[in-house]
Image: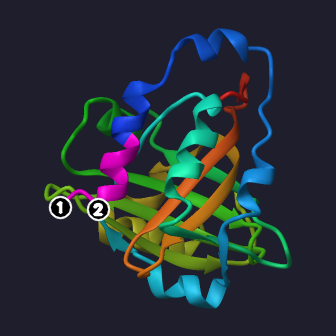
Amino acid sequence: MQSKTIYRIKKDLKKLNTNLFVINKNENFSFQYLLNDFQKVSLDELDKVKLLDRQDTKFVFNQIHLPLILEKIKPFYRILEINKKLVFIYENTYFDTDDFLFYNQHHNENRKRFKVRFRKYSSNNKSFFEIKIKNNKNRTVKKRLLADEMNECLGEQERDLVSAIIGLPGDQLAPKLDLEFSRITLTDNSFNERLTIDTNLSAKNGISSKIFDQL
């Protein structure tokens, strides 16, 4: 069932004046001051809501809408704080086959699809090898292994996990995309759901790069 908070966000996004895009198209909006008023939650408390098996709902919108959204959800959510920081960097290296099997699964909106990546979390300075599975029941399941560092190739453990979950030889996968972004992580006051907001996205594939600083 869709949460009331998600419903409110959808409703408010539809009401927003699109002229705001024109006014702010050359500005990198700073929302840091809006985060300070949230109730804080520790990483240990947030671990109650790991949600490695969950249902995802995602939105893409211009950063100018963020103040309204943050104000709307403030009474219902708490923000992750670690060492007095509220925004954390996520580094990702995504793997795919040479014919981009996983990308095409997402592009074609296949009911069952995969993401394979190394991810480094600045919140705890840990790196993981992760496989995300979107199943035909619209659930997202994440399997992961602790990694010493971000790698450009898969080790034996990673290859075995790919083979067991996806059914492909791990040596058929290679790094295809590096993605970095800043993330705000929130949990509802009942610790039943998690909400993440990603900004300052940058991507590169070895040939070209792109910064999405208004998303």
Q: How many numbered badges does the structure rendering display?
A: 2
Instruction: Indicate the amino acid at tag 1.
Output: Met
Coordinates of residue 215 in the picture (x, y in percent):
62, 32
The prevailing secondary structure element of the residues shown in magenta is: helix
Up-down relation of residue 201 to residue 22 (above or below): below
Name the residue: 77% across, 63% down. Answer: 36
Which residue bears the numbered disc 1? Answer: 1
Q: Which mark is residue 55?
A: 2
Residue range corresponding to the magenta coloring:
1-9
Coordinates of residue 76 in the picture (x, y in percent):
47, 67
Does residue 7 show up magenta in the picture?
yes
SS label for mark 1 = loop
Asked if one can make out residue 152 in the rendered structure from this viewpoint, the answer is: no
Up-down relation of residue 63 to residue 34 (above or below): above
Q: How far is the residue under mark 1 from the one under mark 2?
A: 10 Å
Name the residue: 70% across, 47% down. Answer: 181
Along the line of sight, the residue nearer the viewer: 79 or 164: 79
